[in-house]
Amino acid sequence: MTLHVPKHFAALAGLVAGALAVTIGMLVAAITEVVSPIDAVGSEVIDRVPRWVKEQAIEWFGTDDKLALRVGIISILTIAAVGLGVVAARRPWVGAAGIGLFGLVGALAAAHRPGEGLGAAVPSIIGAAVGAAVLHRMVRPRPIEVPGPSQAPLGWDRRRFLAAGGVAAVSAAAAGGVAQALENRRVDELRAATREPLPELAASAGPDTSTAPLDLPPDAQLFDETPFVTPNDEFYRIDTALSFPNINIDKWSCEITGMVDVPLKISYADLLAMPQVERAVTLCCVSNEVGGEYIGNAVWRGVMLRDLLETAGVQPGAEQVYSTSLDGWTCGFPVAAAFDGRDAMIAIGMNGEALPLEHGYPARLVVPGLYGYVSATKWLARIELTTWDQEGYWVPRGWSAEGPVKTQSRIDVPRTKTVPSGKQAIAGVAWAQFRGIAKVEVQIDDGEWQQATLGADVSDDTWRQWLLEWAPTPGLYLLKVRATDKTGETQTELQTPVAPNGATGYHTIRVKVE
Ligand SMILES: Nc1nc2c(c(=O)[nH]1)N[C@H]1C(S)=C(S)[C@@H](COP(=O)(O)O)O[C@H]1N2
Ligand SMILES: [Mo]
């Protein structure tokens, strides 16, 4: 005679076995230095979801969208594990096969990730095998031999079940803990590497290929609420990466290949030894709403892209500078943008430090005047000269192939909805990288457009601060701003969404003066 494990115990068995499958997978992945199964599945989800799902996720969760994705995946796995446990009470093999199926999904996802091979499938397979075996063993019906106190009424050995479950749960916690510790150690080591100071910037005599450290005029900063140079830890971060790619600085190199005469392979040491420049460049995201925060200004240090491309020799017919990151993200911009005088560079430094891990250590591209999604590859691995037949990551996902930055302006002061009456300032930033900002105007209610004072013109590639004195009496006010770039073009009032190539419209705020 056999009796089945009661449902709630079977559910518990499913949960424990599922947890063990996931954490063993994480542990094997951490030890063998391949992508973790959950991250692999998460990244596949990121790459495959339709645009509206992604936009909804960003609207709900903002830059916490990745945390939301992780929580979502873990919730689905938890529900599935409980369900498989319950099924397994009657059909142990079905439960075990279910865990195997999830393992297969993890294995396929991991092996499919850019930069990973078949080896990346192993953690999921081992994890699923262990989880399936544990589930099967825990719920397998047993003939009753000697009815003892813990066996008698149920027909299954509760004590034995709980002991096995306990061991499995503790093992899962241990495996998860060690896996997380290994990942933390990996990231700590990478961070330590980013804290190595860069060699002094040489002030050699070259025309514009080598230069002294950049000196910023103090009057670039007209007001304090928005620093003219965005500190590294306040700089916005946008990317598709769920975890930092595996970076081995001693083995790292950037290839320059494709339609070139001489393909190059440049190591980190090579980059450090090449003539470098320091340039203030404002970087912004095409997903920045009017008035949004996905913009920052940094002093980037790096090697001019045109120097490297001239060394490699760009062949006629090459249309696109197409780059790939260590984690397989891609983007591309016109070859002309590397040669039309703008300071496109492979950056290794940001605001006097090596590039932070979040912003692309060891090297990234920075191209003034282009949105990040077409140009600013972080964790750079490869630059290929090619035609427009190749599409960057966001292009088949509904974004324009070319992404020149639109002239825009933002009101940063007042920052609160209510302000006291009396003398104060309306202030903010305006940007039109590569063209430069010529004029900023502010409109209060239906009044005349008034010209704001501009901060120092550091370069055409950075934002400019602007400020207008204001001494309002109590009341409700509507404030609008608009910028004009140095080609004479004033930004359009027409409101358009961020997709497919950047939002337009005047940033407008309502203020109550008390
Ligand atoms: N490897 C990689 N590089 C990337 C991205 C990415 O998803 N992966 N996103 C790009 C986008 S859309 C932007 S706006 C900028 C943002 O750079 P930041 O995070 O340093 O501000 O990086 C670009 N480089
Ligand atoms: Mo972006």
Image: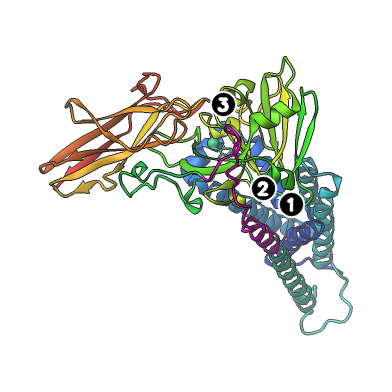
Which residue carries the number 2 mark?
362
In front of the other: 419 or 68: 419
Tell me the magenta residue range.
184-213
Image position, residue 260 (x, y; %): 77, 24
Q: Is residue 238 visible?
A: no
Q: Residue at x 58, y 25 (%)?
A: 398
Circle 1 Cα neighbour tier, 10 Å, few/some/many (<14 / 14–19 / ≥20): some
**Residue 399 numbered tag:** 3
Q: Residue at x 73, y 48 (%)?
A: 269
Q: CA distance from mark 1 to mark 3?
A: 33 Å
Image position, residue 176 (x, y; %): 71, 65
Q: On screen, 257 above or below 246?
A: above
Quarter of the image where the N terminus is located: bottom right
Overall secondary structure of the magenta stretch?
loop
Q: On screen, 287 above or below 87?
A: above
Q: On screen, 500 above or below 410?
A: above
Which structural element holds mark 1?
loop
**Which quadrant holds residue 165?**
bottom right
Q: CA distance from mark 2 to mark 1?
A: 7 Å
Which structural element holds mark 3?
loop
**Which quadrant holds residue 469?**
top left
Circle nearer the viewer, 3 or 2: 2
Q: Earlier in the sequence, mark 1 or mark 3?
A: 1
**Which quadrant holds residue 477?**
top left
Image position, residue 121 (x, y; %): 82, 48
Given the image, on which type of amino acid does mark 3 rest?
Answer: Trp
**Residue 249 numbered tag:** 1
Residue occupying the far top of the picture? 317
Residue occupying the far bottom of the picture? 149
Q: Earlier in the sequence, mark 3 or mark 2?
A: 2
Q: Residue at x 78, y 65 (%)?
A: 4
